[in-house]
Image (spheres, grey):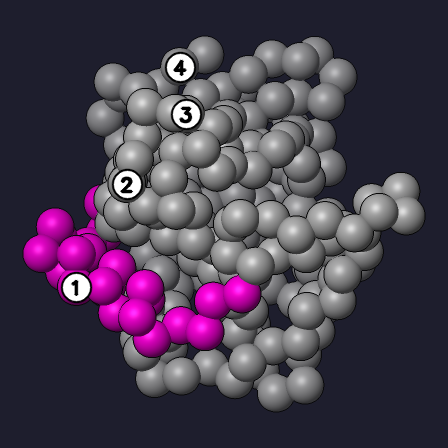
Amino acid sequence: MKLFDEPSDPNVNLLPFDGEVYYYGKIFPQTESFELFRQLMTTIHWQNDESFLYGKHYVTKRKVAWFARQNASYTYSGKTHHAEIWNPFLLEIKQKVENHTKQSYDACLLNLYHSGEEGMGMHQDSEKELMPGGSIASLSFGAERKFVFKHLETKEKVELLLEDGSLLEMKGMTQSCWQHGLPVSKKIAQPRINLTFRQMR
């Protein structure tokens, strides 16, 4: 099911069953999104993401940063990330996201995709540090990209476009029953920054 041309309604669950996904559309106007993107590009200490799979060490072109409360850590793909402390700039963004979702978040994983040739394979955010069934709020800046959900059993897909300045929320059974990913696209030359606000145990 493709939702590219559907109007965004944050009260409508985009998943047909086994989970909850809500798309709020653009929560920042274009001029503000552009300025936030510029600040994120220039002020965040971006690092290449690393993973250890089947005994092999991988370094991605995609870059990441991790922010949370003091002494927080987060492990995925065999790599433990130690958080930087929230700065006032990110706390302001977090507050706006929380105002929309009516949730509170303990941490944020930031991703920098330099172009459409960088993406994210199908996966679940089910690490032990995350609150089971908790809310994950995904905020996008920069290039518009397709985002895909795939049910683990039925293989049914839900696809939508994440716009510049837009917010997507996943919660409930979503991480247990669905995978999600960001497909690569050689047609997209512009970068994208994604902030995923998370609820920790």
Residue linked to disc 1: 35
Q: Is residue 29 magenta?
A: yes
**Quadrant of the drawing holding the C terminus:** bottom right
- The reply to whether discs 2 and 3 touch (Cβ–Cβ < 8 Å) is no
* Image location (x, y in percent) of residue 177: 70, 30
Nearer the observer, 79 or 31: 79
Q: Amino acid at mark 3?
A: Ser
* Mark 4 nearby-residue class (10 Å; few <14, some 14–19, many ≥20): few
* Image location (x, y in percent) of residue 65: 52, 66
- The reply to whether discs 4 and 2 touch (Cβ–Cβ < 8 Å) is no
Residue linked to disc 3: 185
Residue linked to disc 2: 190
Circle 1 SS class: helix
* Mark 2 nearby-residue class (10 Å; few <14, some 14–19, many ≥20): few
Q: CA distance from mark 2 to mark 1?
A: 16 Å
Circle 2 SS class: loop
Q: Which residues are magenta?
A: 26-47
Q: Earlier in the sequence, mark 2 or mark 3?
A: 3
Q: Amino acid at mark 4?
A: Lys
Tag nearer the camera, 4 or 3? 3
Circle 4 SS class: loop
Residue linked to disc 4: 2
Q: CA distance from mark 4 to mark 1?
A: 30 Å
Q: Is residue 128 magenta?
A: no
Tag nearer the camera, 4 or 2? 2
